[in-house]
Structure formats: structure tokens, C-alpha cells
Image (cartoon, rainbow, N blue to C red):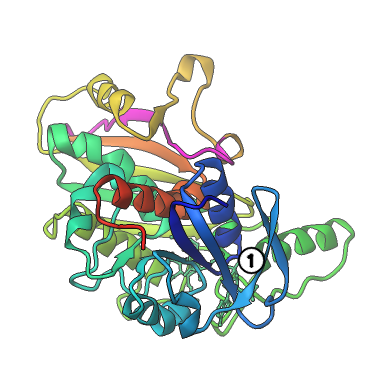
């Protein structure tokens, strides 16, 4: 540990996102003076490695945040509701990975490539958007900046790691059972707390999070509402269909969008994506080059391919957007927010 730098707390450190958070902090050589790892009572006492050093996980309590500069939360919405205000009360800046505060006024919802200026307006809590929203807005923003944006229709192909460590285990367990010809008893997916559970192995489940009264799921509503907030475009027309697939990591999205500008070619859209921060264009049909989840695991960028102009609508285009949901979709975007806070001098060492 350094003698200078920040006191960082990771809430949910033992989880699928928390583990990636630790790896990302390590890889970025984040300036850390003190590291506090928090979980529920279940994992308290476990040790986790950071830069080869062992850290003991503690049960998250209000007092855990004394002296903390930045708290990275990924332990579920109810924990954030309970403990984020306690962290802020003690002088920490919270970067929250849950949906608890995303749509609250006064809480910036940030993808640094898109709206880092919003960080200036924070009141202690900064929200990290939903994984599916992050990769989509990162790809749409360079197009919006040059050509405007009118409409977005997205269908997602989401990995099980987005539903946590237990969902990953459920997918592998079911796969093994089915290959051995045994019965499976789904318990977690699509949503642990919902009435019914369905097999994820060798399946596609068109439900992520719970259904709302309007027929959309909460995941779909997150994509719709968060996109409008991040882009400062309440008038943008957005629709989403979110589907879970038996892929461990890497969310894919088929995105149809309409721009304001008439007469554009797919090449012009691709040129904007090529120059955009955090985006890698992988688009060469002649050589069968396009992004896939198996190729994006462990990478921080958002990969875009299959860019093509709609055959009927002059302002309409299609693209395929893939990213590691635990990195740009969660841990990396959060650490990037923390790095941006330092760069913009919005956080100081205590
Ligand atoms: P996970 O693998 O199930 O991990 C959950 C983590 O939360 C574990 O570290 C767990 O600790 C901890 N936890 C559970 N109950 C707690 C409590 N009462 N007090 C303190 N810690 C508690 O889930 P995950 O996939 O890492 O996701 C965690 C959360 O991050 C999600 O619920 C979601 O809100 C958010 N998330 C956001 C995105 C995004 O798109 N930005 C993506 C995925 C997840 P134990 O080891 O003690 O159980
Ligand atoms: C991704 O238990 C919970 O509250 C977590 C539900 C959840 C969320 C969420 O709503 O915070 C699971 C997976 C997310 C998310 O990023 O929106």
C-alpha cells in the first residue's frame, strides 16, 4: 500500500462485480492508501488478494465508512439504499453500481466518454448506469454528436454473469446435469425473487429483472430511462427487449437507430466510431470480422460491428455492440468514474 493516495472501500467485494472491481483497481494501479473490503456477514473473515497482499473482508456497517474517500458499491439496491447515505454522511463519495439512485435528480448517471461534465453536480452519490445501457450509449454518442439522434430500438443478448455469481454457477450446474441426462431444478434465473424460474442452459429467456405494469421488464425500462438521462435527451424515442442467454460473460446488442441527418452512408457512421474514445470498430464482412462476447472477455472497450444502412429508412442504421458486462458494464466504468473525479479535482485525499 502507498502512503499517499485514497482510502477506497469496495462494498460487495466478494461478488462477481466486486472481484472485477479489485482486478481493475490493481491493473490501473489506482492510487490507494488504504483498502477496505466489505460484504455481508456470510463472507466476513474471508481473505481476498490485492497486489499479492491479503485483505480480510469485513461485514459492511455504517461505521465501515469512517475515513473512506471513495466507496464503490455493488452489493444490490437495498444495501446501497441502506449504506450509501451512511458513507456520504462520513465524507465519502459513493460510486453506486445499483439501480437504487440512478434516476434521482441530483445524482449524476455517468459514462465518462459521454457525460463526465455531469460529475460536477454530484451531492455525494454518483450512479453507474446499467451494463446494457453503458455499452449502447458509448457507441451511440459519437454518432449523436455528429449526426443527431431521433430513435433507438435495441434487442439484447445478455450474459449470465450480469445476474451474479450464483447465476453463473446455476448455468454451469444445469449444463453438466443436462449433458449427463439428469433433470434440472432452476432456482435463480431469470430473477431470484420472482415466482417462477426457468432453465438457462441451452435456452434463451426473454425476461431480465421483473415485469412492470407497461409490459416492459425493469431491465428494459433501465435502458430506456437511463439512455435519455445520460444523453440529456428526454425526447429521444427508445425501446428495448432484453434477453438472457447461456453465455458466461459479454453482453451483445442489436441496435437500430435513426439519426437527424439525411443521406448518410454506413461508411460515414463507421468513420465516427473508428475515432471514438473507448470504441473498437471490428467490421469487415468480407473477412467475417465482427465482435463476439467470447472475444471481448477481459477487455475494457466497447466493440462495434455489422454497421449497415437500413434498406427502407434513409436515416436508419443497424449495428452490433458487444462488451464485457463486468468491465465497461460495471467495474471499469466505476473505476473510470473514480479516475475522472481525481482528474477533474472533484475528490481530495483526506
Ligand atoms: P453477486 O455476485 O451476487 O455478489 C453480491 C455481493 O454483494 C457479494 O459481495 C455479497 O457478499 C454482497 N452482499 C450481499 N448482501 C449484502 C449485505 N447485506 N451487506 C453487504 N454486502 C452484501 O452479485 P454481482 O453480480 O456482483 O452484483 C452485485 C450488484 O451490483 C447487483 O445486485 C447490482 O445491483 C449491481 N450490478 C450492476 C451492474 C451494472 O450494470 N452496473 C451489473 C451487475 C451488477 P457475500 O459474499 O457476503 O454474499
Ligand atoms: C444488475 O438486488 C438488487 O437490487 C440488484 C438487482 C440488479 C441490478 C439493479 O437493479 O441494481 C442486478 C443486476 C442491476 C443493475 O445494474 O441495474
Left/right placement of residue 16 relative to residue 269 reads right
Q: Is residue 246 above or below residue 10?
A: above
Q: Confirm if mark 1 falls within 8 A of ligand 1.
A: yes
Q: Is residue 261 above or below residue 73?
A: above
Q: Is residue 156 visible?
A: no
State ligand 1's quadrant: bottom right
Q: Is residue 40 visible?
A: yes
Q: Residue, x 45% and y 19% (percent of image)?
A: 284
Q: Which residue is mark 1?
A: 14
Front one among 218 and 48: 48
**Circle 1 — which element?**
loop
- Residue 302 in magenta? yes
Q: Residue, x 43% and y 46% (percent of image)?
A: 253
In the rendered image, residue 143, in percent from the top left (x then y), is placed at 22, 35
In the rendered image, residue 114, in percent from the top left (x then y), is placed at 25, 45
* Span shown in magenta: 296-314
Left/right placement of residue 299 relative to residue 318 reads right
Q: Is residue 335 above or below residue 190?
A: above
In the rendered image, residue 112, in percent from the top left (x then y), is placed at 30, 46
Front one among 283 and 105: 105
The quadrant of the image that shows the C terminus is bottom left
- Residue 312 in magenta? yes
In the rendered image, residue 95, in percent from the top left (x then y), is placed at 38, 63
Quarter-of-image position of residue 70: bottom left
Amino acid at each position: 500500500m502507498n502512503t499517499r493516495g485514497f482510502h477506497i472501500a469496495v462494498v460487495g467485494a466478494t461478488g462477481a462485480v466486486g472481484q472485477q472491481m479489485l482486478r481493475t483497481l490493481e491493473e490501473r494501479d489506482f492510487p490507494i492508501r488504504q483498502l477496505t473490503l466489505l460484504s455481508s456477514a456470510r463472507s466476513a473473515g474471508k481473505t481476498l488478494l490485492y497486489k499479492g497482499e491479503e485483505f480480510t473482508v469485513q461485514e459492511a456497517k455504517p461505521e465501515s465508512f469512517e475515513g473512506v474517500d471513495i466507496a464503490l458499491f455493488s452489493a444490490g439496491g437495498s444495501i446501497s439504499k441502506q449504506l450509501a447515505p451512511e458513507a456520504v454522511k462520513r465524507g465519502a463519495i459513493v460510486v453506486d453500481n445499483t439501480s437504487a439512485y440512478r434516476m434521482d435528480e441530483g445524482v449524476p448517471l455517468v459514462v465518462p466518454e459521454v457525460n463526465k461534465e455531469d460529475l460536477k453536480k454530484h451531492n455525494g452519490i454518483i450512479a453507474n448506469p446499467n451494463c446494457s445501457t453503458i455499452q449502447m450509449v458509448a457507441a451511440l454518442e459519437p454518432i449523436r454528436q455528429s449526426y443527431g439522434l431521433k430513435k433507438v430500438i435495441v434487442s439484447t443478448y445478455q450474459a449470465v454473469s450480469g445476474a451474479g455469481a450464483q447465476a453463473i454457477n446455476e448455468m454451469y450446474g444445469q449444463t453438466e446435469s443436462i449433458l449427463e441426462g439428469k433433470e434440472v431444478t432452476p432456482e435463480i434465473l431469470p430473477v431470484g425473487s420472482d415466482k417462477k424460474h426457468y432453465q438457462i442452459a441451452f435456452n434463451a429467456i426473454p425476461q431480465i429483472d421483473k415485469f412492470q405494469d407497461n409490459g416492459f421488464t425493469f431491465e428494459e425500462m433501465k435502458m430506456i430511462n437511463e439512455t435519455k438521462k445520460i444523453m440529456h435527451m428526454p425526447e429521444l424515442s427508445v425501446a428495448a427487449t432484453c434477453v438472457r442467454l447461456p453465455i458466461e460473460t459479454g453482453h451483445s446488442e442489436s441496435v437500430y437507430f435513426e439519426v437527424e441527418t439525411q443521406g448518410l452512408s454506413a461508411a460515414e457512421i463507421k468513420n465516427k466510431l473508428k475515432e471514438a474514445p473507448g470504441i473498437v470498430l471490428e467490421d469487415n464482412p468480407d473477412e467475417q470480422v465482427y465482435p463476439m462476447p467470447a472475444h471481448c472477455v477481459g477487455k475494457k472497450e466497447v466493440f462495434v460491428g455489422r454497421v449497415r444502412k437500413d434498406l427502407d429508412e434513409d436515416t436508419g442504421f443497424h449495428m452490433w455492440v458487444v462488451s464485457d458486462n463486468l468491465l465497461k458494464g460495471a467495474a471499469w466504468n466505476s473505476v473510470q468514474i473514480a479516475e475522472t473525479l481525481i482528474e477533474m479535482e472533484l475528490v481530495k485525499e483526506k
